[in-house]
């Protein structure tokens, strides 16, 4: 909104100052479609960039018969198989038998 200063018309009448819209009606709805597309693209892009890309196969402690097998898999890629080490001490599947 903008403030319009008071003024006199040509016929001598006084028009008091007041607030007015600064945009015309033809302009106000012109870019709504473009803004919607931009907002949707940003939202979709953020959703993709924030999601974890998982190229790791799903392995649990039940997938292994011994702790040594689970440990070798865990040691091959610790970030990929971090669910095999529940307490974070570096030893995978501590509940399995050690052979």
Image (tube, rainbow, N blue to C red):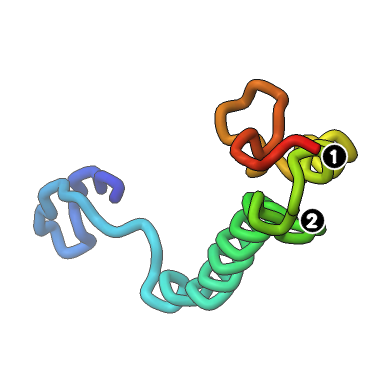
**Residue carrying label 1:** 77
Q: Residue 99, percent across and down?
A: 81, 38
The residue at 24%/43% (across/down) is: 5
Check the image and report above or below for 9 versus 40.
above
Check the image and report above or below for 65 versus 79.
below
Badge 1 crowding class, 10 Å Cα cut-off, few under 14, some 14 to 19, many 20 or more, is few
State the residue in front, 61 or 79: 61
What element does badge 1 sit on?
A: loop
**Residue carrying label 2:** 56
State the residue in front, 54 or 26: 54
Upstream in sequence: badge 1 or badge 2: 2
State the residue in front, 83 or 65: 65
Horizontal relation, residue 85 to residue 18: left or right: right
Badge 2 crowding class, 10 Å Cα cut-off, few under 14, some 14 to 19, many 20 or more, is few
The residue at 13%/57% (across/down) is: 12
Q: Residue 20, percent across and down?
A: 24, 56
The reply to whether discs 1 and 2 touch (Cβ–Cβ < 8 Å) is: yes
Check the image and report above or below for 31 versus 95.
below
Horizontal relation, residue 46 to residue 72: left or right: left
The residue at 25%/48% (across/down) is: 4
């Amino acid at each position: 909104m903008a403030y319009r200063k008071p003024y006199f018309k040509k016929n001598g009448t006084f028009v008091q100052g007041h607030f007015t819209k600064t945009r015309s009606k033809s302009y106000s709805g012109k870019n709504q479609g473009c803004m919607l597309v931009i907002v949707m693209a940003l939202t979709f892009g953020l959703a993709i960039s924030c999601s974890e890309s998982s190229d790791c196969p799903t392995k649990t402690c039940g997938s292994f018969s011994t702790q040594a097998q689970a440990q070798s898999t865990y040691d091959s890629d610790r970030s990929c198989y971090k669910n095999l080490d529940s307490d974070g001490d570096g030893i995978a599947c501590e509940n399995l038998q050690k052979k």
